[in-house]
Amino acid sequence: MLFKARSAAVYGIDAHIIDVEIDYSGVRLEKEIFSTVGLPDAAVRESRDRVRSAIKNSGFDIPTTRITINLAPADLKKEGSGFDLPIAIGILGAYGALHAKDLSDYLLVGELGLDGSLRALQGMLPIAVAARAKGIRNLIIPASNAREAAVVEGVNVYPVQTLLEVRELLNSASFGTLAAKPLAVNTTDLLDEMQHFQHDFKDVRGQHVAKRALEVAAAGGHNVLMIGPPGSGKTMLAKRLPSILAPLRFEEALETTKIHSVAGVLDAELGLVTHRPFRSPHHTISDAGLIGGGMIPRPGEVSLAHNGLLFLDELPEFPRNVLEVLRQPLEDGTVTIARAAMSLSFPARFMLAAAMNPCPCGYFNDKSRECMCTPPMIQRYVSKVSGPLLDRIDIHLEVPAVQYKELRGGTAAEGSAEIRARVLGARERQYERFTVEGERTKGTARAAARPIFSNSQMSTQQIRMYCELSSDADRLLERAMQQQGLSARAHDRILKVARTIADLGAERDISVKHIAEAIQYRTLDRSYWS
């Protein structure tokens, strides 16, 4: 007797549909013999013991015969414990414990406990997306994963807790009506919920130039490097940066949730990432921890920060080899991890915020303290951050020590709500601009590229289209390029920042003042790294 069920396996952040075929010979033996084929890993091979106990503890018998389990396609390596449920259902269906004979419209995923209960798995959102793409309408999964999968429209998600519950659900479907209702999640309400932040910019005294620079960075999604003495407020500013970032759009939230689901860090109660991620790894992190890796490649910190903020405090304290792996994601927005078994790509389109001291003692160029470092010590310290990496950071910002009068002043500082309102206005203008372009290029090769949501993500063609300069602004930029020896990459990033500054002022054209402010944010690398 042959019975077929459908399941899925996750590779990277995408899922592939797997056909689970169960056949038993009918020849009576002293005990049942399981044989699993189709490149199963150890977790899949061990499923026979979990499935055997789950079926028996659910009140069913397993025929004492040879049972062959095939996971197709056979050339894909199968990993994880998510095949327990479809294998158990396939065995029940093969010897007649199910009324349903055709399960092609159902996708089953779940790990079984020995008592027949279902446990949660990682990567359920990519599985729901794959089911919708293949036209599979019904998804039967553990209740703990239900909200995560239900954010995908066009798929009916049925949360279940035991193997018996799954059998009853499928049997009821064979009579024309399902015994349960699919779980519904309103994603619009989730994303529109009031976002609360622990930190607020009103706590920051002084640092008006730094606040302005961070506002520009948040409005365009630009990378920023803060240099200043200890205690000047670099970390304090960075921790408040998420409070002025624009909220996630649904497309961004879905892609971010897929990564967090695969990594196993998703909040099961929410089911959807509703805030932009903020990741702040310690400087002792390895290159694999930052970029991702392992025998089975898993996303690293740069991918967990996708569509959010990656904050690297004490930047020169990170090992140089760790910092250098940031080059590809900062440029391309993706990370490719190649291993002998497979090569996977993870999205890594994040905003980088970094902080560092100007020298080992921290007081170089500080008016209140004398620096004890020699020029070779200072040069050796700052050279830990390479020129190519520095060239990929749009805004270089000096954060001086706060004066006593500013620290004790009674004037209330501008809060995050006011700054965020201006950032949202600029982001809305960018979204409208790129949406109009998307409609205009629909059906062309350019439309096939992934959508962009901020100025920092503009391609070279889009920079030429949206960053036209007047003759005066063009001369100013040319003079800055020649005097400071800026690269072609720096040229493009200055134009992107200038476009963001113009958007903050609700101005259509980039003027001289916008270019001048953008150039001002590229001068520190000539002071410290020259």
Image (cartoon, grey):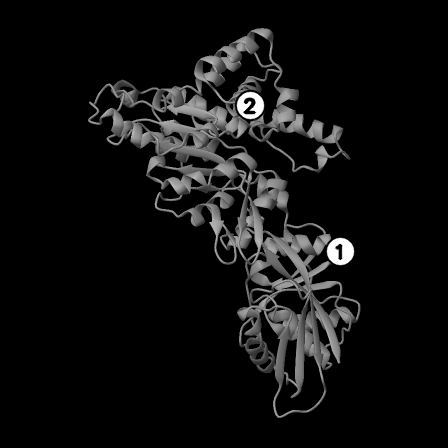
Q: Residue furthest top?
A: 472
What kind of residue is marked 2?
A: Asp
Depth order, front residue of 479/168: 479
Where residue 383 sits, quadrant-wise, is top left
Query: Left or right: 478 with respect to 402?
Result: right
Residue 91 placement: quadrant? bottom right
Secondary structure of residue under mark 2: helix
Is 275 left or right of 384, judged from the image as shown?
Answer: right
- Residue nearest the observer in this picture, 197 or 77: 77
Counting every numbered tag in the picture gives 2
Residue positioned 55% across, 78% down in the render: 49
Q: Position of residue 433 (x, y in %)?
A: 66, 25
Q: Is residue 196 visible?
A: no
Q: Is residue 61 above or below residue 189?
A: below
The secondary structure type at the circle numbered 1 is loop
Q: Is residue 386 above or below residue 524?
A: below
Query: Residue 47's spot in the image, x, y percent?
Result: 57, 73
Q: Position of residue 509 (x, y in %)?
A: 61, 14
Disc on res. 135: 1
**Around disc 1, counting alpha carbons within 10 Å, would you say few (fewer than 14), some (14 to 19), or many (20 or more)?**
few
Label at residue 492: 2
* The image quarter in which residue 84 lies: bottom right
Under mark 1, the amino acid is Gly
Q: Who is closer to the viewer here, 308 or 469?
A: 469
**Sequence order check: which comes first, mark 1 or mark 2?**
1
Are discs 1 and 2 less than 8 Å apart at CB? no
Q: Position of residue 130 (x, y in %)?
A: 68, 54
Which residue appears farthest toward the right when viewing the image?
176
**Quick one: 198 or 427, which is closer to the camera?**
427
